[in-house]
Amino acid sequence: MAERVIIHMDLDTFFVSVERLLNRELEGRPVLIGGASDRGVVASCSYEARRFGIRSGMPMKTARLLCPEAVVLRGNMADYSRFSAMVTEIIRSSVPLYEKTSIDEFYIDMTGMERFFSSYRMTLELQQRINKETGLPISFGLATNKTVAKIATNEAKPGHLRIAQGLEKPFLAPLSVKKIPMVGASTYQTLAGLGLKRISTVQQMPVELMEAALGRYGITLWKKGNGIDNSPVVPYCESKSISTERTFDSDTTDVAHLRSVITAITEALAFKLRQEHKLTACLAVKVRYADFNTHSRQMHLPYTAADHLLIPRALELFDKLYNRRLLVRLVGVRFSHLVGGGYQINLFDDTEEKINLYQAMDHLRQRFGKRAVMRAAGWPEAVATRR
């Protein structure tokens, strides 16, 4: 059986890199991307910002205290999605099998290619091609499985690292257990309480003791710590849903404002559907109250990408959900059951003028930004967002 060759590729500080391509004045400066309010969090930060102790997931208020001179950007998912699609297409056309696990992260299976080419050299060439054609830096790790490849990427950033077969355990041993992908902050505290701070300690533990202490999770952790991971690279398939949420700076009971937010979100998502030539057949709305109780409702509808059909349904769901005068922390809208296809003409309601109007509006949005044209009902939300 051929030795497995798995590559993990990760775009370096992806959101920041895209912003710098669009604005060269950001080069060399500490950049924070995420919610600009004190209640927001850092979605991404530049290496310059990380020198101040800033990391993804940190409250934006804390990050700005650590680095007052940082440039804070709200970010634009449309731009990030566009660049991600460019990278995905390059990878798709270059490798036999790949899995896209997030907007900026990929696994590639090169098993068997060593008979014909050097997998390492092919990946180096792919790395260089992505950088040349998109302007985006990307790092990679090459190993015999997904876990070791991902850890190798994180240790190599920015750059690349190859872990040969048989060297997985020595490579992992000196690292913190926090380096294992499945270990988060709370899990690390639990492991540290058991004396499991280094992967070498996990490697020295009998698997039976790990199971006794942590159950089935302990077995999985022991395997990953010992460089054992047989999970396959799953062929990439497109997402079956898209969604957007809005967390308010201050909890609110302003129903008119809440409805304007729902309108703006639904309109933006409908535009995204049309951009990607997709249709939805299921709409869901979510409301989270100040006490963090979260409620959602959904409805099925004929396949469409028209916001004049989707917005009334979204507001209808919101009205059914919000039947109490409680402070609202967050609202969200999700489209699911997505399929490929163009805008479907409604023979009973649509006119040629309406179809032409959609085409003209979408053209203006593509040229001048998604907020260049929007419904008056969603305008208060646009003003609040710009502020």
Image: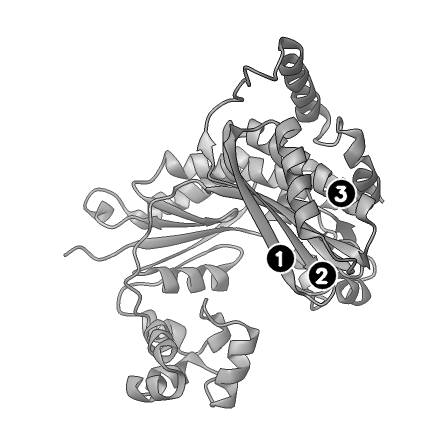
Instruction: Assign a secondary structure to mark 3.
Output: helix
* Amino acid tagged 1: His
Task: Give residue 103's position: percent from left, percent from top.
Answer: 52, 46
Q: Which residue is mark 2?
A: 289
Q: Is residue 40 above or below residue 308?
A: below
Along the line of sight, which residue is nearer the eye, 282 or 163?
Answer: 282
Q: Is residue 211 above or below residue 350?
A: below
In the displayed structure, does residue 212 sit left or right of residue 343? left
Cα–Cα gap, marks 1 and 2? 9 Å
Q: What colour scheme does the image use?
A: one colour
Direction left: furthest residue: 1
Cα–Cα gap, marks 2 and 3? 15 Å
In the displayed structure, does residue 198 sit left or right of residue 134? left
Along the line of sight, which residue is nearer the eye, 50 or 272?
Answer: 272
Instruction: Assign a secondary structure to mark 1.
Output: strand
Along the line of sight, which residue is nearer the eye, 338 or 56?
Answer: 338
Q: Which residue is mark 1?
A: 295
- Say whether marks 2 and 3 touch (CB < 8 Å): no
Task: Give residue 162's position: percent from left, percent from top.
Answer: 37, 59
Label 2 vs 3, first from the N-terminus: 3
Q: Residue at x 51, y 86 (%)?
A: 192
Q: Determine which quarter of the picture holds residue 367.
A: top right
Q: Is residue 300 above or below residue 304?
A: below
- Crowding around mark 2 (Cα neighbors within 10 Å: few <14, some 14 to 19, many 20+) is some
* Amino acid tagged 3: Arg
- Say whether marks 1 and 2 touch (CB < 8 Å): yes
Q: Which residue is mark 3?
A: 259
Task: Give residue 108's position: percent from left, percent from top.
Answer: 35, 48
